Amino acid sequence: MNMITYRKAEINDCLPIAKLKGIVWNTTYKGIYTDEALANYDVLKNKIIFEQIVNNPEIEVYVAVNIEQIVGFMTCGKPYKPFEDFQQEIGMLYILKEYQRQGIGKTFFNIARQQAALKGHNKFLVAVNKKNYEAQKFYIEMGGKMIYIDESQMRFSYSL
């Protein structure tokens, strides 16, 4: 049985997080992104990006850990791209395929809700690739209300 723990990410987690994102991209986005785009995923470039996010006081990064392996991560806080009057979002939520459907995503959502409430907000946003149907089902299950759709993304709103 998996014993998952959750904690805020630290700088030394950025390389494992970047590697995990690459693995999840290849299992989730095959057929959505080009094979070339997936093959060109740059772990070291993403490590640097995650270091910037971890060091950003307006965004939190949380990891789900099984024993000592990071099996999922989530970013929450100030939106990467402003959208309407939303001040909080779940920016990224990635979980290894073999750990999906075990409550990790729900726990991440609860953490994001708590963080938004602690900052005095009453709603947050999630954007998802329009072709990522599994994620869309999950976001709807979590109570999301679809508020926007364009050629590549859908956005869901959550009230606290």
Image (cartoon, rainbow, N blue to C red):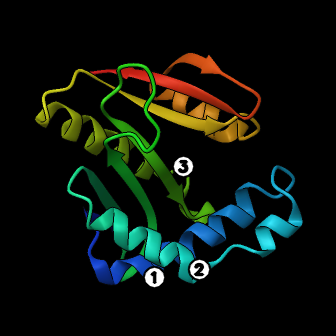
Q: Where does label 1 land, which residue?
A: 15
Q: Which mark is in front, 2 or 3? A: 2
At 20% from the left and 26% from the top, the residue drawn is 121
Q: Quadrant of residue 110?
A: top left
At 23% from the left and 21% from the top, the residue drawn is 122
Q: Where does label 3 land, which residue?
A: 101
Farthest residue in the front direction?
82
Towards the viewer: 96 or 2: 96
Q: Where does label 2 land, which residue?
A: 43
Q: Quadrant of the C terminus?
A: top left
x%, y% of residue 119?
14, 35
State if disc 2 and disc 1 touch (CB < 8 Å).
Answer: yes
Q: Quadrant of residue 133?
A: top right
Residue 111 falls left or right of residue 120: right
Residue 1 seen in the figure? no
x%, y% of residue 16?
46, 80
Task: Please rate how many residues cluster around mark 2, counting C-alpha atoms within 10 Å: few if below 14, some from 14 to 19, many from 20.
Answer: some
Q: CA distance from mark 1 to mark 2?
A: 7 Å
Q: CA distance from mark 2 to mark 3?
A: 26 Å
Residue 151 falls left or right of residue 10: right
Mark closer to the chain start, 1 or 2: 1
